[in-house]
């Protein structure tokens, strides 16, 4: 029999909650339902600047829905989403669009354009959203392709490269505008354990070099161990834990302990 989640949603804290200007991402009592199904049921969280936060939870618990709220692609039924201190839904669409330019997004499959080669895929945001010359664009694109180890594959199209290479190309494209926030939606999806570890190490290394606030959606426990400064665990629409990674992996909360240990003993069943 499944144990019920906490009845009072937690205030998930990265930076000191008294320092309200410290967090680039603030969620205040965010709720979202599809019909009678409550996907997010009062999620509140302050994400730490210049850190990597992983959001974990069972499949279907709303991790990707949470990401879409942070990016401003989905409006909450109630509650507030603040990015850089701005309530996204108090802004005009053009203003939200400008804020989205300060995000980099790495999707599950890389989301590359199939008709473009790797170079043009990575160059796309710069051509679309800046007035840089082609020489300046080439310098930037080649820099990030080299950092992800794809400088020799720039003329290939996505159908000619492996899944791991697609992820790396997608990561280069996410970084090319030098965003302040990077959102990664299950970057390990479809990768074997070795390539997952290599990708996580790459993400961690480039974060250490370039900085920024990273939010990584995953249900891969080892990926979370490798990447995380902070860990949030989403279950039944609530963050049942949010805090430093060490606290998460040593938590006494039954669901958090079970999920992060991958145990069959605990409140999470087959429902």
Image: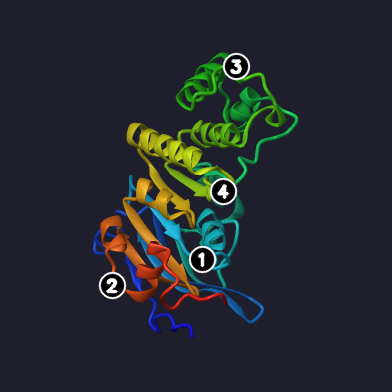
**Cα distance in 3D space between marks 4 and 1:** 14 Å
Question: Left or right: 237 with respect to 117?
Answer: left
* Up-down relation of residue 234 to residue 122 (above or below): below
Residue 15 x %, y %: 27, 57
Front residue of 218/117: it is 218
Q: Which residue is mark 1?
A: 58
Which one is closest to the eye, mark 3 or mark 1? 1
Task: Determine whether 262 is above or below 141 in the image.
Answer: below
- Residue 84 in sight here: no
Q: Which residue is mark 4?
A: 189
Counting other residues with Cα less than 10 Å from the Cα at mark 1, is it few (<14), some (14-19), or many (20 or more)?
Answer: some
**Foreground tag (4 vs 3):** 4
Q: Tell me the SS state at disc 1.
A: loop
Give the residue at the far right of this rendering.
Answer: 115
Q: CA distance from mark 2 to mark 4?
A: 28 Å
Instruction: Identify the residue at horizontal 49%, vertical 24% (top origin).
Output: 149
Residue 266 coordinates in the image, percent (x, y): 41, 76
* Res. 267 visible in picture: yes
Give the residue drawn at x 66%, y 36%: 112
Mark 3 or mark 4, which is nearer the start of the sequence?
A: 3
**Marks 2 and 4 close (CB-CB < 8 Å):** no
Q: Identify the residue position indicated by label 3 in the image.
A: 134
Label 2 crowd bin: few (<14), some (14–19), many (20+), radius 10 Å: few
Please identify the quarter of the rendering in which residue 248 is found.
Answer: bottom left
């Amino acid at each position: 029999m499944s144990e019920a989640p906490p009845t009072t949603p937690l205030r998930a804290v990265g930076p000191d909650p008294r320092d309200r200007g410290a967090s680039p991402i603030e969620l205040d009592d965010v709720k979202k339902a599809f019909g009678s199904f409550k996907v997010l049921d009062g999620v509140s969280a302050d994400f730490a600047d210049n850190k990597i936060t992983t959001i974990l939870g069972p499949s279907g618990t709303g991790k990707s829905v949470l990401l879409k709220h942070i990016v401003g692609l989905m409006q909450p039924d109630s509650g507030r989403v603040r990015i850089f201190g701005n309530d996204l839904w108090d802004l005009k669409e053009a203003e939200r669009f400008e804020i989205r330019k300060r995000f980099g997004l790495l999707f599950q499959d890389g989301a590359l354009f199939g008709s473009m080669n790797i170079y043009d895929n990575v160059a796309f945001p710069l051509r679309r959203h800046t007035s840089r010359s082609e020489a300046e664009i080439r310098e930037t694109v080649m820099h990030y392709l080299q950092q992800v180890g794809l400088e020799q594959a720039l003329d290939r199209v996505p159908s000619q490269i492996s899944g791991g290479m697609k992820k790396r190309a997608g990561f280069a494209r996410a970084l090319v505008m030098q965003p302040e926030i990077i959102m990664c939606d299950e970057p390990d999806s479809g990768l074997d354990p070795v390539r997952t570890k290599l990708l996580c190490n790459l993400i961690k290394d480039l974060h250490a070099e370039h900085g920024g606030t990273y939010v990584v959606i995953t249900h891969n426990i080892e990926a979370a161990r490798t990447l995380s400064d902070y860990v949030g665990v989403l279950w039944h629409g609530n963050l049942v834990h949010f805090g430093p990674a060490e606290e998460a992996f040593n938590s006494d909360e039954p669901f958090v302990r079970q999920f992060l240990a991958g145990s069959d003993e605990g409140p999470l069943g087959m429902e």
